[in-house]
Image (cartoon, coloured by chain):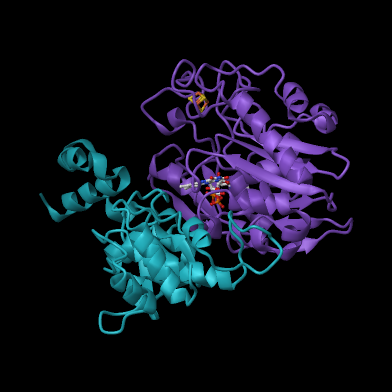
Amino acid sequence: MKPFTYERATSASAAAAAAADNPGAKFIAGGTNLLDLMKLQIEAPSHLIDVNGLDLDKIEPTQDGGLRIGALVRNTDLAADKRVRKDYGLLSRALLAGASGQLRNKATTAGNLLQRTRCPYFYDTNQPCNKRQPGSGCSAIGGVTRQLAVIGSSDACIATNPSDMAVAMRALDAMVETIDPAGAARRIPVADFHRLPGDTPQVETALQPGELITAVTLPKPVGGKQIYHKVRDRASYAFALISVAAVVQPDGSGRVAVGGVAHKPWRVEAAEGEMPHGAKAVAEKLLAGAKPTDENAFKLPLVERTLAAVLAEARA
Amino acid sequence: MTKHDIEVTRRGVLATGAATAAVLAVQAAYAQPIVPLASLPSAKVSLVVNGHNEDLTLDTRTTLLDALREHLHLTGTKKGCDHGQCGACTVMVNGRRINSCLTLAVMHQGDKVTTIEGLGTPEQLHPMQAAFIKHDGYQCGYCTPGQICSAVAVLAEIKADIPSHVTGDLLPHASFSADEVRERMSGNICRCGAYSNILDAITEVSGETA
Ligand SMILES: Cc1cc2nc3c(=O)[nH]c(=O)nc-3n(C[C@H](O)[C@H](O)[C@H](O)COP(=O)(O)OP(=O)(O)OC[C@H]3O[C@@H](n4cnc5c(N)ncnc54)[C@H](O)[C@@H]3O)c2cc1C
Ligand code: SF4
């Protein structure tokens, strides 16, 4: 790890202001992604702003019948919350499908949304990677691509977003609340929060420098059967090859977001009109324009079959 | 080598990991610029470790794991992968299990840390320690302190109604089963493969039959 100075933030606005004053600064919450990357010197902040002391660890009802989840709510606590289990089961399921008990005890809502890709070349500092070192090239293109993106990728980057939680948040139309260094608050729909790689794969979200996430809000419950199905190389404690997050209403209508296929949770609202017609019809629209490699082309039928299993489970 | 050189070498080793440690140990004294230790950022932190107050001034980069092992000489907690993937470094902080390798010591001002040394002693074993011995829940023993800390926490998590990936219905209170234990213990890897005996030990302590 590179040396860094350290401070404990005392308020959200002070934390954001401190980040703006220190161009090399990063916030640290659970630390489970940032420290991992700092040990490998993929991240090398010169200053850490510890946000764990901020009063952002509550889950509260919102005025319009939804929930406001503080940025520091731990993944374990969010998954175990009675209201979340009852009304947003999809979110509990996605959280519980991720990482391990130890990690979920530390991982926070904001940190989870901002976790970085698991592309093996991003982790290998001996290889070019446009995300790690802009302009150096992408080693994954033409390399080992089994885990990488099949849609929405670019000539600069074919990485995927590894978060399970974010896929559920996307299906549930969550909103990210932030505060910037000037103290101004804003709300960003999770749909616009994560970016596609384009020419700038190093820019992963809509956050501006120094902008701090304060909460994520969920709109009022949408009901339906809520199912998160994650397909991975071992039964537990592994990142998704693909995952399907679905809300299915009694009349067969609903929503679906997919993980493990793109640089962001993948949802195409137009495809959801096909839900009563079955998985094949949905998958065709959802994945139209996909550009898989030979190694990861399996993800396309895997999404369709997993969605079929999810729809069957919802009907059962 | 002067004492100062040794310090620098050791930092190089800590920063780079075991794989390249041997190479670095040779190179460090020659190739690395020697940074005076006093100029490296440090911070003070007070922890309560196994009931004892510990006031430390640490290089900010020190993980909780390294603070326990290298500064407090509590070497029961093990360093396996150092990346949160193996669970050997599992300890309890304020009653919850975490990977001590993926957190900085300075982030734990005032926190209560329980390590394997704090769970029980050779004379007075914690029931989970006794059950691991009885059921042969290990072979080489390297992952065992982490397995035991995790196992104690798993039973507490079920009691606290925290569901898991294999919980059938999210609404009723979480309950014990062999599948629940297997899923909840998946963050602790055992290369010797003592899993079935670990399950037997945890089952005995839970008072349930799996
Ligand atoms: C072995 C292992 C297995 C894993 N498996 C899975 C898995 O299967 N599925 C899955 O989804 N995840 C998995 N994870 C990832 C895990 O979920 C993330 O590491 C965790 O959610 C990150 O949260 P954190 O609070 O620890 O973030 P940190 O590491 O503290 O921070 C991550 C990033 O967010 C920034 N940040 C933190 N808080 C804020 C804030 N309030 N405002 C602005 N920026 C902020 C930090 O600056 C940093 O850039 C795994 C991790 C490990 C180590
Ligand atoms: S896919 Fe993206 S993250 Fe992976 S090597 Fe290419 S640029 Fe880097």
Res. A171 visible in picture: yes
Q: Quadrant of residue A286?
A: top right
> Which lettered chain is shown in purple?
A
Above or below residue A249? Residue A52 is below
Q: Residue furthest left?
A: B1
As drawn, is B95 to the left or to the right of B3? Answer: right
As drawn, is A112 to the left or to the right of A206? Answer: left
As drawn, is B173 to the left or to the right of B151? Answer: right
List x then y, in percent, for residue B206.
Answer: 47, 74
List x then y, in percent, for residue B50.
Answer: 38, 77
Chain B appears what colour?
A: cyan
Give the residue at x 30% y 42%. Answer: B16
Closer to the camera in the image, B43 or A258: A258
Q: Residue furthest bottom?
A: B124
Closer to the camera in the image, B48 or A105: A105
Res. A170 visible in picture: no
Give the residue at x 50% y 20%. Answer: A295
Above or below residue B2? Residue A139 is above
Give the residue at x 77% y 27%. Answer: A282
List x then y, in percent, for residue B205.
Answer: 43, 75
List x then y, in percent, for residue B181.
Answer: 49, 62
